[in-house]
Image: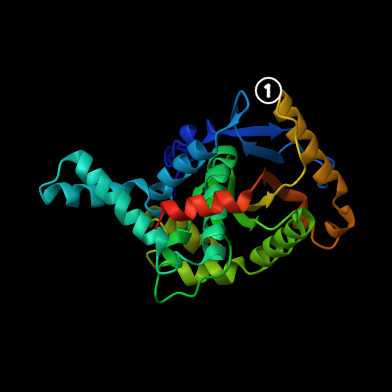
Amino acid sequence: MLTKSDIESKLINNDALFNNIHIIKQRFDIIPDKDTHIGANIAYQDIRELRTEFINELYDTIVDWIYDSEKYQEILKKEMQKGKSRAAASSAVQRKASEKFRGNNVTDKLLVQGQMGELLLFHFIQRFMKATPLVRKMKITTSADMERFGADAIHYRKDDDKNVFVLGEAKVYTSDYQFNSAFKNSLDSILNTYVNFQQELNLYVHEDFLSPELDDIAESYLNNTIENPYFDLVCIVVYNENKEIDVLNNNSIYSQIEEIIKERFKNFDNSKIDIKSYPILSRINYIVFPIWKLEELAIEFQNKIK
């Protein structure tokens, strides 16, 4: 069984992406009351929003979502054996990853938006929850033999004596302000994911969807021989914000966005978060990511992967 250090060694370096994301961590007026909820927005340099830089960095990480480090090195080696330089081989691996990400539905706007949300979820879970992918969901997306359904992210980490499974859902809404409906849908989706987790995981064991060294962890969970299994839930809601902000300087902008996120949390009806009926919701972690003119940004991202 892998150790905690083994798992953490598999986490990717995504500093470059998060250099273009401003993070707000505090206690928001939402249940469960905890300090692990996150507000996020595209970073600013003075009064310039780093939209292009954010999209470029997100695009560059597609290869991390498609391939784990071992698979990346395997493909890189094969490309170099064809007679390519390391730089040319790296470019070829990036191209292959983009082709897999693009699949046959690059013109499907909703699919691209969803993949953008799942890619962000992948990074937030690794950075803030220190959990590595247990299931490579992008492989399922591009598999001709597997229907795409279930969790948007299934990650794993080791916490002392606990084996922690992190289940994640991503919701991206480009229409004018739909925060409440997106938030409620994310809750419904993550509960459904949790309830059906064992059935879903059973489909992936012994397939190419799991990293080989993590296959034993999935097997032990399904056989109920794993010690101290534990679940964490995370939902990321990326939505189109329409509240105007005064563009004065970056600190002022960040303060205004923080207030907007606090207001969105506060105005959500806590009675819809039914922890009494679903105790697992006491472990949920929210990531709220407002983006102005989100549809334009999604189109820009879509154009990069064509």
* Residue occupied by mark 1: 249
- Which quadrant would residue 23 be assigned to in this image? top right
In the image, 84 versus 187, the foreground residue is 84
- For the question of whether residue 306 can be seen, the reply is yes
Q: Is residue 202 left or right of residue 169?
A: left
Does residue 298 sit above or below 47 in this rendering? below
- For the question of whether residue 74 can be seen, the reply is no
**Where residue 141 sits: x, y (%)?**
46, 66
Q: Is residue 189 left or right of residue 129?
A: right
Q: In the current view of this chain or complex, which residue is farthest to the left?
A: 83
- Which quadrant would residue 258 be assigned to in this image? top right
Does residue 251 sit above or below 237 in this rendering? above
Q: Residue at x 35, y 59 (%)?
A: 99
**Where residue 32 sits: x, y (%)?**
81, 46
Does residue 283 sit above or below 151 in this rendering? above
How would you rate the neighbour count of disc 1 (Cα within 10 Å): few for under 14, some for 14-19, many for 20 or more? Answer: few
Q: Is residue 268 left or right of residue 77?
A: right
Circle count = 1
In the image, 174 versus 235, the foreground residue is 174
Q: Residue at x 45, y 58 (%)?
A: 136
Q: Is residue 203 left or right of residue 261?
A: left
- Which quadrant would residue 42 be assigned to in this image? top right
SS for callout 1: loop
In the image, 177 versus 27, the foreground residue is 177
Q: Residue at x 86, y 44 (%)?
A: 266
- Image quarter of the C terminus: bottom left
Q: Residue at x 50, y 39 (%)?
A: 52
- The three-letter code of the residue at mark 1 reads Asn
Does residue 43 sit above or below 178 in this rendering? above
In the image, 15 versus 297, the foreground residue is 297
**Where residue 261 sits: x, y (%)?**
77, 40
Colour scheme shown: rainbow
